[in-house]
Image: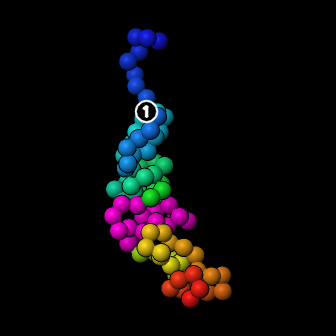
């Protein structure tokens, strides 16, 4: 309809998620997201670390069987219950 002035986004700025043609603000911890909730992050703001299993951004990895590479929480080697890195 040429008289319809509605506009729809196809791409959103950092810190926003595209939902039904509209850009909605991510949770403050997320720099990119798939929704507005704290557990819908895809990447993190600042020095926060991304936990892909929970889709959250945290100051530290909260699962004991994970370690941080500085950006993301990664799983320890399967033989470890706690670790400092992939092989320790």
Examine the image and state in which quarter residue 38 appears.
bottom left
Measured as percent of width and height from the top left, residue 6 is found at 40, 22
> Is residue 83 among what the camera can see?
yes
User: Is 9 located above or below residue 31 in the figure?
Assistant: above
How busy is the neighbourhood of tag 1: few (under 14 within 10 Å), some, or many (20 plus)?
few
Q: Give the residue at mark 1.
A: 9
Q: Which is nearer the eye, 37 or 86?
A: 86
Q: In this view, does 78 lie to the left or right of 12?
A: right
Q: Which residue lies furthest to the bottom in this view?
A: 88
Q: In this view, does 9 lie to the left or right of 54?
A: left
Measured as percent of width and height from the top left, residue 22 is found at 42, 35
Q: In the rendered structure, does residue 29 fall within the stretch colored magenta?
A: no
Q: In which quarter of the image is the C terminus?
A: bottom right
Q: Which is nearer the eye, 59 or 86?
A: 86
Question: At 39% from the left edge and 57% from the top edge, which residue is drawn?
Answer: 30
Is disc 1 placed on a helix, strand or loop? Answer: loop
Question: At 59% from the left edge and 86% from the top edge, which residue is drawn?
Answer: 87
Q: Residue furthest right?
A: 79
User: Is 74 located above or below residue 81 in the figure?
Assistant: above
Question: At 50% from the left edge and 85% from the top edge, which residue is drawn?
Answer: 84
Measured as percent of width and height from the top left, residue 77 is found at 62, 82
Region of the chain picked out in magenta, as a range: 44-59
Q: In the rendered structure, does residue 53 fall within the stretch colored magenta?
A: yes
């Amino acid at each position: 309809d040429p008289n319809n002035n509605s506009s729809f986004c196809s791409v959103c700025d950092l810190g926003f998620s595209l939902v039904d043609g509209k850009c909605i603000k991510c949770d403050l911890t997320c720099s990119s997201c798939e929704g507005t909730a704290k557990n819908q992050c895809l990447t993190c703001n600042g020095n926060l670390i991304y936990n892909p299993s929970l889709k959250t951004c945290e100051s530290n990895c909260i699962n004991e069987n994970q370690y941080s590479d500085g950006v993301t929480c990664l799983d320890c080697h399967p033989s470890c219950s706690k670790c400092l890195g992939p092989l320790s």
